[in-house]
């Protein structure tokens, strides 16, 4: 999860979230990776931190304990979406080849 996503989730400024993450990193409590993303309008590129699931809980608990439930919900939503099976391709029942393939699976 990115520091931008966390900022949006807890209604905090991104720079404030990054300061909190920096402090937690300095204490050895979380580990981050960084990326640089372009800003809309071509301004100065934005440094964004990325944390894993465990560390995102630590960051959000530090920033705003009342939003920890939102974070749990967000991770659970992502896990559900990732676990959803891909939809089966639709068969054209007007196609002879599709009907033969379907008949072959039933035989």
Image (cartoon, rainbow, N blue to C red):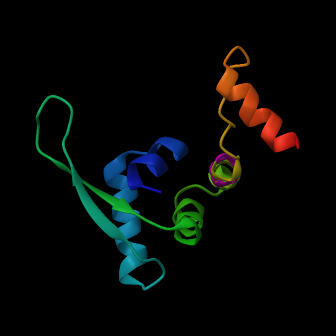
Residue lying farthest right? 107
**Closest to the observer: 18 or 53?**
53
Residue drawn 45% across the image and 47% down it: 5
**Closest to the observer: 98 or 86?**
98
For the image, the number of numbered tags is: 0
Magenta segment: 75-81
**Closest to the observer: 32 or 99?**
99
Counting from the top left corner in percent of width and height, residue 40 is at 21, 32
Q: Is residue 32 above or below residue 56?
A: below
**Chief secondary structure of the magenta span?**
helix
**Closest to the observer: 1 or 87?**
87
Counting from the top left corner in percent of width and height, residue 25 is at 39, 78
Q: Is residue 42 above or below residue 55?
A: above
Left or right? Give the position of 30 relative to 98: left
Residue drawn 68% across the image and 37% down it: 87
Left or right? Give the position of 36 relative to 81: left
Left or right? Give the position of 19 relative to 88: left
Residue drawn 15% across the image and 28% down it: 41
> Residue 16's quadrant in the figure?
bottom left
Q: Quadrant of the C terminus?
A: top right
Residue drawn 56% across the image and 69% down it: 58
């Amino acid at each position: 999860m990115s520091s931008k996503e966390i900022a949006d989730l807890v209604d905090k400024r991104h720079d404030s979230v990054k300061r909190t993450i920096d402090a937690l990193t300095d204490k050895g409590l979380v580990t981050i990776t960084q990326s640089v993303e372009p800003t809309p309008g071509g301004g100065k590129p934005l440094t964004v931190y990325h944390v894993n699931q465990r560390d995102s809980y630590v960051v959000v608990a530090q920033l705003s304990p009342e939003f920890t439930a939102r974070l749990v919900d967000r991770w659970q939503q992502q896990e559900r979406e990732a676990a959803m099976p891909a939809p089966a391709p639709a068969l054209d029942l007007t196609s002879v080849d599709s009907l033969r393939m379907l008949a072959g699976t039933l035989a």
